[in-house]
C-alpha cells in the first residue's frame, strides 16, 4: 500500500497498471482540483486530500494504523522561500509520522530543479536524525531516453 503527494504527470499510474504491480494507493493529496480528480479517476484511492497540511492532519488524527509500504512525493514550485520551507518541513513530519504510525518502509521524493536547496537539506537532515538512510541524486531525463530536456532531484529513503 502506498501514499502519494502530487499527481504530477501521472506517468507512474500507467506504469503500475501496465506492469501489473501490486501497489495499492490508499492515501493521496494534491493541491490542484485537477490532480485530485485524476487521482480519483485513475486510481482506486478512496482518500484524496487537498494539500500537504490536510494530509499531515489526516495521518495524525485518522487512527488508521494500516501498514504503508511507500510514500512518493512530487514537489511543486512555490511563490516564496517561506512556502517552500513550510512544505518541506511538513513533508518531513509526514514521513516521520507515517513511519511511526503506519510502519512506512520507503520514501521516494522528486524535487523540482528550481527549489532552493536549503529546505531540501533541512528535510534530509530531519529524516537522517529519525534514522532514515537516504540517497540524493540529480537525474537528467535525456540520459534515460526522454525527450524532455530537464532534470529532477531524486531522494530515496529506507
Image (cartoon, rainbow, N blue to C red):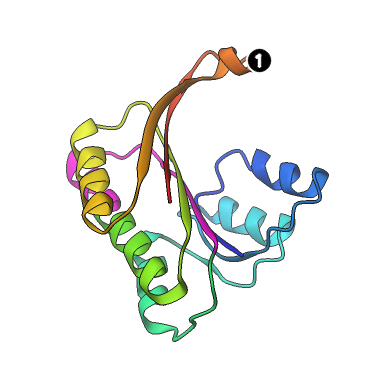
Question: Is disc 1 surrounded by few (<14), some (14 to 19) or many (20+) residues within 10 Å?
Answer: few
Q: Secondary structure at mark 1?
A: loop
Residue drawn 40% across the image and 28% down it = 137
| Quarter of the figure with the N terminus | bottom right
Residue drawn 54% across the image and 73% down it = 67
Vertical side of 75 occupied by 144: above or below: above
- Please tell me which residue lies in front, 150 or 96: 96
Vertical side of 45 occupied by 62: above or below: below
Q: Indicate left or right for 36 with 156 as reference.
A: right
Q: Position of residue 153 (x, y in %)?
A: 40, 30
Q: Is residue 73 magenta?
A: yes
- Per the rendered image, the range of residues in magenta is 69-88
Q: Position of residue 132 (x, y in %)?
A: 33, 52
Residue drawn 73% across the image and 48% down it = 16
Q: Indicate left or right for 20 with 3 as reference.
A: right
Residue drawn 74% across the image and 58% down it = 22
Q: Is residue 141 visible?
A: yes
Q: Indicate left or right for 73 with 143 as reference.
A: left
- Please tell me which residue lies in front, 66 or 4: 66
Q: Which residue is mark 1?
A: 145
Q: Position of residue 37 (x, y in %)?
A: 63, 58
- Please tell me which residue lies in front, 123 or 50: 123
Amino acid at each position: 500500500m502506498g501514499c502519494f503527494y502530487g499527481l504530477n504527470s501521472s506517468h507512474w499510474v500507467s506504469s503500475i497498471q501496465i506492469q501489473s504491480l501490486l501497489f495499492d494507493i490508499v492515501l493521496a493529496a494534491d493541491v490542484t482540483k485537477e490532480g485530485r480528480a485524476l487521482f480519483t479517476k485513475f486510481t482506486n484511492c478512496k482518500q484524496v486530500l487537498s494539500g500537504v497540511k490536510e494530509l499531515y492532519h489526516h495521518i495524525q488524527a485518522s487512527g488508521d494504523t494500516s501498514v504503508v509500504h511507500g510514500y512518493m512525493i512530487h514537489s511543486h514550485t512555490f511563490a516564496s522561500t517561506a512556502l517552500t520551507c513550510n512544505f518541506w518541513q511538513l513533508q518531513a513530519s509526514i514521513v516521520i509520522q507515517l513511519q511511526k504510525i503506519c510502519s512506512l518502509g520507503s520514501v521516494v521524493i522528486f524535487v523540482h530543479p528550481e527549489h532552493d536547496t536549503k529546505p531540501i537539506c533541512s528535510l534530509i537532515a530531519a529524516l537522517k536524525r529519525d534514522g532514515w538512510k537516504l540517497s540524493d541524486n540529480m537525474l537528467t531525463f535525456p540520459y534515460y531516453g526522454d525527450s524532455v530536456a530537464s532534470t529532477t532531484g531524486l531522494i530515496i529513503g529506507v
